[in-house]
Amino acid sequence: MFRTVSSRLLRQHKCVHPACFYGTQTSSSSTNLKEVLTVKIPEKQQEVIAFRKEHGKTKVGEVTVDMMYGGMRGIRGLVTETSVLDPDEGIRFRGYSIPECQKLLPTAKGGKEPLPEGLFWLLVTGDVPTQQQVEAITREWNERSPLPNHVITMLNNFPHNLHPMTQFSAAITVLNSESKFAKAYSEGVNKLKYWEYVYEDSMDLIARLPTIAAIIYRNLYRAGTSVGVVDMDKDWSYNFTSMLGYDEPDFTELMRLYLTIHSDHEGGNVSAHTTHLIGSALSDPMFRLVSQLYKIVPDVLLEQGKAKNPWPNVDAHSGVLLQHYKMTEMNYYTVLFGVSRALGCMASLIWDRALGLPIERPKSFDTPSLRKLASQAAK
């Protein structure tokens, strides 16, 4: 509802770029992300209060029986500030397309692809960060990266036939022992302070995920060799690829882009919704094949009328690129995806708590009841 009505307001606004609307009214030169949020959150809270007061009863769509049987596809029922799927241009992060993010977001020294740290700042604040702000996030994640010994022990004791994603999920669950939110909640912290503790947990989790994922990879595919230690002078993606055992600069650049573009995918996808609900050009034979598919398939689909948006999403090529760099362990790809998607999920979760969004309790119907409703609506 918020995005639909806000798009109408946007068209009346002098600025035509979506980011002019989705971003909050103030930006800051501070390199302390939490400090920036402390200013932005009260502003957004008041904006939402005013918006709901004016448009709270505005109808923005309808629900059909097919939508209900079709997994609620197309139902306008969620508010997600971090990203939205544009029907023509694909994903937009806070109003910015992927090519725009590639141009605007800071890069590593000598690099060309955006740093995930910068994308995270954008997702959380709505502002394009400065190089200094991104470097501050890198330092903070590096400082927060050490894993508790019991998590390392658990990962090293897992059987080698246990799926990497199962190991990844288990390690994240066990990290609850370090949760600042859980401790504060048990002590009765005021709801207005929830976002601060969720922020701390989110930053801790993102900082630790590369080490967790690297230990799993080394144990399963590299005979349990050591991941080494985080280099405090390097960025999040560099440390991740280094711990995985890949030292090719082009692969590090690919991983920076991979972790950025997979970070978020609107609010209705499985990972984002679950979180909300519960808290360079390459030229091998495979890459050319993907390139040809990009050139041929969309026109065919459009001609046949089989798809409204024929362009494939990022998953169509990311696996090919990983295989080009000899990361052929396909079972591990979901772990890489999980490391990236944590950026979007955690950014949204901070805002869920800042805005006090309630637990979703949709009304469900059995087929007889729904049939009765449908016949009444048809009269």
Image (cartoon, rainbow, N blue to C red):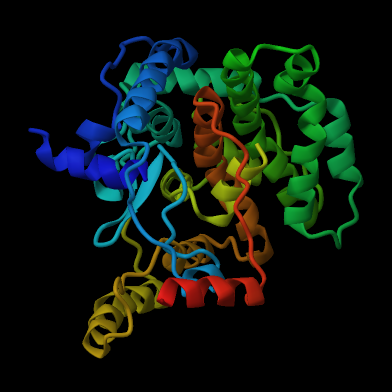
Residue at 57% x, 41% y: name it: 342
Asked where in the image residue 100 lies, by quadrant, the reply is top left
Residue at 51% x, 60% y: name it: 322
Tell me, yes or no, if residue 41 can be seen here: yes
Q: Nearer the viewer, residue 198 or 10?
A: 10
Number of marks present in the image shown: 0
**In the current view of this chain or complex, which residue is farthest to the bottom?**
304
Asked where in the image residue 173 lies, by quadrant, the reply is top right
Residue 130 horizontal/vertical position (percent):
30, 21
Query: Image height check: is 89 above or below 22?
Result: below
Residue 297 horizontal/vertical position (percent):
30, 82
Viewed as shown, does residue 174 lie left or right of 126? right
Q: Nearer the viewer, residue 379 or 354?
A: 379
Residue 189 horizontal/vertical position (percent):
70, 12
Query: Image height check: is 216 above or below 125?
Result: below
Query: Image height check: is 200 above or below 238?
Result: above
Q: Nearer the viewer, residue 136 or 48?
A: 48
Residue 268 horizontal/vertical position (percent):
50, 53
Residue at 57% x, 23% y: name it: 141
**In the current view of this chain or complex, which residue is farthest to the left?**
14
Q: Nearer the viewer, residue 98 or 158?
A: 98
Quarter of the figure that contains the C terminus: bottom left
Tell me, yes or no, if residue 102 can be seen here: no
Viewed as shown, does residue 148 lie left or right of 189? right
**In the current view of this chain or complex, which residue is farthest to the front?**
379
Query: Image height check: is 151 above or below 266?
Result: above
